[in-house]
Image (cartoon, rainbow, N blue to C red):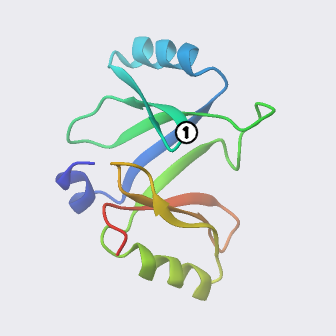
């Protein structure tokens, strides 16, 4: 994620769940007119939609059964440099941390959250602080 994105934007990333990673790569590359780069981390294959300074996203294989997890698309909200504090506040303010902060390879750290209204999203930080 670019410095501009982590300093200036609240919405910083999106995961789009897909059934067939290769087919989805071809679809999004063609429709968006951008490169799509396949990567893997910790045994999970995914594909990143090329972006420079702006907000980015990736294609992520769905869980077994091909059904969306949560809302199908996971939006990442920026809490750069304060993910531990933000997760603590989630619980204090009536939400749930459904997956504690964890590394997502060279792309920083995320925590999966359910807000006080039942909406699922992720918190993102470049550091685990």
Q: Position of residue 63 (x, y in %)?
A: 72, 38
Residue at coordinates 20% horizontally, 42% vertically from top-left? Answer: 53
Residue 60 against residue 119 in the figure, above or below: above
Relative to 71, is 54 on the left or the right? left
Q: Position of residue 69 (x, y in %)?
A: 71, 45
The quarter in which the C terminus is drawn is: bottom left
Residue at coordinates 42% horizontally, 11% vertically from top-left? Answer: 30
Q: Position of residue 87 (x, y in %)?
A: 51, 77
Which of these two is toward me, 96 or 84?
Answer: 84
Residue 44 against residue 123 in the figure, above or below: above
Which of these two is toward me, 77 or 85?
Answer: 85
Which of these two is toward me, 104 or 58?
Answer: 104
Q: Which residue is mark 1?
A: 43
In the picture as drawn, the residue positioned furthest to the front comes out as: 43
Relative to 82, is 28 on the left or the right? right
Pointer 1: residues within 10 angstroms few (<14), some, or many (20+)? few
Q: Name which quarter of the figure residue 48 lies in.
A: top left
């Amino acid at each position: 994620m670019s410095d501009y994105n982590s300093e200036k934007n609240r919405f910083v990333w999106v995961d789009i769940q897909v059934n067939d990673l290769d087919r989805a790569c071809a679809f999004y590359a063609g429709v968006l007119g951008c490169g799509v780069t396949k990567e893997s981390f910790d045994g999970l294959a995914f594909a990143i939609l090329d972006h420079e300074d702006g907000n980015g996203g990736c294609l992520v294989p769905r869980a077994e059964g091909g059904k969306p997890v949560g809302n199908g698309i996971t939006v990442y909200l920026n809490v750069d440099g304060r993910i531990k504090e933000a997760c603590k506040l989630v619980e204090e303010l009536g939400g749930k941390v459904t997956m504690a902060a964890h590394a997502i390879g060279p792309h920083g750290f995320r925590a999966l959250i359910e807000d006080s209204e039942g909406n699922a999203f992720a918190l993102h930080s470049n550091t685990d602080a």
